[in-house]
Image (cartoon, rainbow, N blue to C red):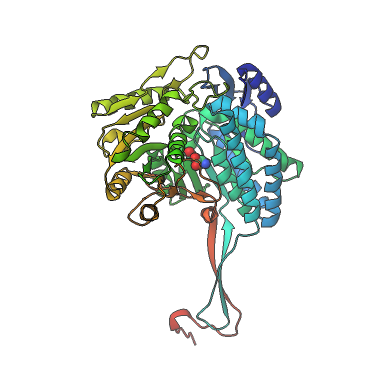
Amino acid sequence: MDSNLDFHSVRDRVFGDLGLFQQVSGLYDGQWVAGEGRGLIAIHSPINNECLAEVAVAGEKDYDRLIERAWASFDEWSRVPAPKRGEVVRAIGDRLRAYVDSLGLLVTLEVGKTPVEGKGEVQEMIDIADFAVGLSRQLYGMTIASERQDHRLYEQWHPYGVVGVITAFNFPCAVWSWNAFIAAVIGNVVVWKPSPSAALTAIATTNIVNDVLDEQGLPPLFFLAVDGAGEIGQRMSSDSRLPLLSFTGSVRTGREVAARVGERLGRSILELGGNNAAIVTPEADMEIALRGVAFGALATAAQRCTTTRRLILHESLSDSFLPRLVEAFRNVKVGSPLESGVLVGPLIDSRAVDGYSSAIGRAEAAGGQVLVGNSVLALPGLEGGNYVAPTLIEGLPPDSDIVSEETFAPILYVFRYSDLQEAFAIHNCVPQGLSSAIFSNNLREVEAFLSVIGSDCGLASVNTGTAGAEIGGAFGGEKETGGGRESGSDAWKAYARRQTVTVNYGDQLPLAQGVTFDVN
Ligand code: UN1
């Protein structure tokens, strides 16, 4: 962007384009339910703490009605042939193309992403819609050779029914779409509980996608229930009317969700915290490494689950790479994302700022030295905004408590290594296992990182950062990250019920394993 944008004119334009008002409903159960008698939550922009709108939240009774209606939609939708369902998702993707700017800017206003990242968020929805259209003709099942004569054995995949999706503020619509569009082409109906901090993006998105269905005379498929204090999320976890629940969020809440879903023997897809590291070896292209680490560590103000939180640097690079990174951290422009040249916007709220300060305090107490940063910024004209300085900290033991935690703020911990085995040990010593990267042009180093002794994460990148995955691959991670996979590759199978089918087309009844059972 080459010029500054004015907050209020952007807000007015975006609200106009997307049909948002000062007070909006956060409950879509096949239609938008009026706010009367319901609780309200205020949505503040992290840019300047201004109230953008108030959202009416769903109550207990609302939730039950919504689930009933979602199942009624499922009866109809699940019988539409999959390629026809794909056509519907194609139309949804096309409609989203018309909203890249306005929805992208709403993401900027509501969660503070730069406009280019806000647009990227909508682009990610369009990409997964395209993927889902192709998938709608590729829901392949396997055929297995039967051991019995005149028998056919094969697998088919059915939708589960109504699928719950709980998302975090940091990817306020893209992560929902990874789940929702894939689930929908399989024949599922989706109930979404977004983060209350990003409710407006969820409301606008729900509006756009259901309009398309409405125009085509189809039932609503994308239900929405914004809640205030997590009560709907808890209902969803315990509700056996949701055979599958996809949850993106913290490890702490993920544990509770997993326990509740496990208690009722339901299925869950968990995409929890990351604690991602980049290894930079002496054989790296230093320009690529610098940009890759900076993007990974600072994009989205370090509020991605894929954010680079740890840098594992070869000791020989202490006087070359490290000073350049310190300079990059010092010089990167922090401020309102509506201002030209800003790469690091605000944190989502004041609690996140407290989390930043307390993490740095704990790191210092544990022996860490701050190389740059450690300051909460009061920016002129943006009082009430949640701005902090990108921070680099070195000197901590790699397995210290504070390093083992995911702090959603721009703090990068630096460690040094002398041989690659040591780098891998540092890399894998945290409890999370989402994303990882190595910067090196040495085949041996790279392949060792990708081998079983290397990265223990769900995502491993070479000469590109830990953040910014494409939708075509399966996304998710190991250990405390929860093991779920979403988005591309064959992640769709998690949204479908596998059925093994045996057909006897002969005139005998041979039994498997040679068993005989003659009743006469
Ligand atoms: C997340 O932070 O929950 O790979 C998802 C990335 C994005 C998705 C991040 N495509 O950084």
In the rendered structure, the answer to whether residue 41 lies left or right of residue 126 reads: left
Image point (56%, 26%), residue name: 110
Q: Nearer the viewer, residue 154 or 325?
A: 325
Q: Position of residue 298 (x, y in %)?
A: 45, 31
- Could you tell me if residue 320 is visible in this image? yes
In the rendered structure, the answer to whether residue 362 lies left or right of residue 27 reads: left
Q: Nearer the viewer, residue 514 or 7?
A: 7
Q: Position of residue 213 (x, y in %)?
A: 71, 43
- Could you tell me if residue 26 is visible in this image? no
In the displayed structure, 221 sits above or below 199; it is below
Q: In the rendered picture of this protein, how many numbered marks are placed on residues?
A: 0
View extreme (bottom): residue: 520
In the displayed structure, 419 sits above or below 66; it is below
Q: Quadrant of the N terminus?
A: top right
Q: Nearer the viewer, residue 464 or 272?
A: 464
The part of the image, by quadrant, that contains residue 204 is: top right
Image point (55%, 47%), residue name: 471
In the displayed structure, 509 sits above or below 418; it is below
Image point (71%, 39%), residue name: 95
Q: Position of residue 132 (x, y in %)?
A: 62, 51
Q: Nearer the viewer, residue 255 or 91?
A: 91
Q: Position of residue 450 (x, y in %)?
A: 39, 54
